Image: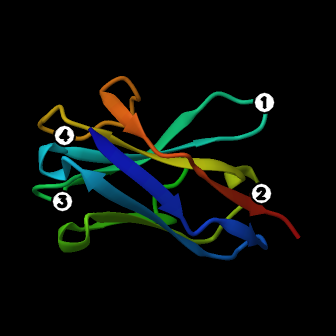
């Protein structure tokens, strides 16, 4: 079992930045991929980005490409999501999730992800 804890959310003005963290504990050596997802009020959860823990390959949703950067620190069992140039439509609860399924490329489809954090709120507003 893998436990995940997100942090770093907050209230930020449009154009601002945050760094979200996802700290993993438990059987972390079995984790192949960490994904970030978000859910806005009244909307379905959507995948934002993912990273393979072993080779560091990444994937981004088109809506965040060029603004968000995902990175890992395997020594700290932590994955970061740097979110820049924030827009009001980026508002939502951001979750990280862990997948044990080793694929050629990571995916932001939620199906392979079995362990989820409790989420951290990001609010973009002036």
| Residue contact at pointers 3 and 4, CB within 8 angstroms | no
Residue bearing mark 4? 105
Pick the quarter of the image with the N terminus.
top left
Q: Earlier in the sequence, mark 4 or mark 2?
A: 2
Residue bearing mark 3? 56
Instruction: Categorize mark 4 by other alpha carbons within 10 Å: few (<14), some (14-19), many (20+).
Output: few
Does residue 97 appear left or right of residue 8 in this picture?
left
Does residue 118 appear left or right of residue 89 in this picture?
left
Query: Which residue appears at 17% of the width and 44% of the height?
Result: 32
| Residue contact at pointers 4 and 1, CB within 8 angstroms | no
Mark sitting on residue 88: 2
Q: Secondary structure at mark 2?
A: helix
Q: Earlier in the sequence, mark 3 or mark 1?
A: 1
Residue bearing mark 1? 42
| Residue contact at pointers 4 and 2, CB within 8 angstroms | no
Q: Nearer the viewer, mark 4 or mark 1?
A: 1
Location of residue 61 in the rendering, given as x and y in whole percent from the top left corner: 45, 45
C-alpha span from label 3 to label 1:
33 Å
Q: Secondary structure at mark 4?
A: loop
Location of residue 86 in the rendering, given as x and y in whole percent from the top left corner: 66, 66
Is residue 45 visible to the viewer in this orientation of the structure?
Answer: yes
C-alpha span from label 4 to label 2:
30 Å
C-alpha span from label 1 to label 2:
15 Å
Query: Which residue appears at 41% of the width and 29% of the height?
Result: 110
């Amino acid at each position: 079992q893998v436990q995940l804890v997100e942090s770093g959310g907050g209230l930020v003005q449009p154009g601002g930045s945050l760094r979200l963290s996802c700290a993993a504990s438990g059987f972390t050596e079995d984790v192949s991929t960490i994904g970030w997802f978000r859910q806005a009020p009244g909307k379905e959860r959507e995948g934002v980005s993912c990273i393979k823990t072993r080779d560091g390959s990444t994937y981004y949703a088109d809506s965040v490409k060029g603004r968000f950067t995902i990175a890992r620190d395997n020594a700290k069992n932590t994955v970061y999501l740097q979110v820049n140039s924030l827009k009001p439509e980026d508002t939502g609860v951001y979750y990280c999730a862990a997948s044990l399924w080793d694929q050629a490329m990571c995916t932001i489809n939620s199906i392979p992800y079995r362990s989820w954090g409790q989420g951290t709120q990001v609010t973009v507003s002036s």
